[in-house]
Amino acid sequence: MCRTCGVQFAQSHAPPPRCPICEDERQYVGWNGQQWTTLDDLVAEGRRNTIEELEPGLLQIATRPPVAIGQRALIAQTPAGNVMWDCVSLVDEESIQALRARGGLSAIAISHPHFYASMATWSAASDDCRSTSTLPTRSGCSTSARACACGRLKPRRSCQALR
């Protein structure tokens, strides 16, 4: 996982040579160069997710202390299922169980490349719920292409929550 933007990449013996999100002209690579972390490292650093009800039918998940650019995810609770709008990088058992207690996830929608975060892991933890992106990145990579590159997402069944 990239420490700067929070996007997770496929497991490998060595970190990727670069992060395409951070190398995009709209982002940056930090002064200390490209840095990587793992979900286990984030937990070991004392990070955890908080889930807060912003209003009836709308939850927020945020990681404290923040990771990367401080992303947060919104959970829209609908009769057809819960939809995660954008994503946080930290996925832990406590957060997964808290979402399952609220009905789990039916879909994940990503608005911006920084929010790809750990979408593949969130999807896998949510019975492989559908993940989709609203816009491609400038490089033309959409969530589908990103997921394919990471090797963890497969084409999903049709999702009632996104119809």
Image (cartoon, rainbow, N blue to C red):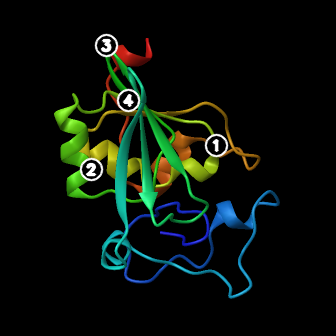
Q: Which residue is mark 2?
A: 95
- Name the mark nearer the viewer: 2 or 4: 2
Label 2 packing within 10 angstroms: few (<14), some (14-19), many (20+):
some
As helix, strand or loop, the secondary structure at mark 2 comes to: helix
Pick the front one: 84 or 65: 65
Residue type pointed to by label 3: Ala
Q: Residue at x 37, y 17 (%)?
A: 161
Residue type pointed to by label 4: Ala
Label 1 packing within 10 angstroms: few (<14), some (14-19), many (20+):
some
Q: Earlier in the sequence, mark 1 or mark 2?
A: 2
Disc 1 to disc 2, how far (Cα)?
22 Å
Q: Which residue is mark 3?
A: 80
Q: Is residue 163 left or right of residue 40?
A: right
Q: Which residue is mark 1?
A: 112
Disc 1 to disc 4, how far (Cα)?
16 Å
Q: Earlier in the sequence, mark 4 or mark 3?
A: 3
- Farthest residue, direction right: 25
Q: Which residue is mark 4?
A: 107
- Name the mark nearer the viewer: 3 or 2: 2
Q: Earlier in the sequence, mark 3 or mark 2?
A: 3
Residue type pointed to by label 2: Ser
Image location of residue 42, percent across then percent down: 38, 73
Residue type pointed to by label 1: His
Q: Residue at x 31, y 79 (%)?
A: 44
Q: Earlier in the sequence, mark 1 or mark 4?
A: 4
Q: Quadrant of residue 143?
A: top right
Compared to residue 24, the image places residue 31 above or below, namely below
Pick the front one: 33 or 143: 33
Q: Residue at x 75, y 62 (%)?
A: 27
Q: Earlier in the sequence, mark 2 or mark 4?
A: 2
Label 3 packing within 10 angstroms: few (<14), some (14-19), many (20+):
few
Image location of residue 158, percent across then percent down: 35, 19
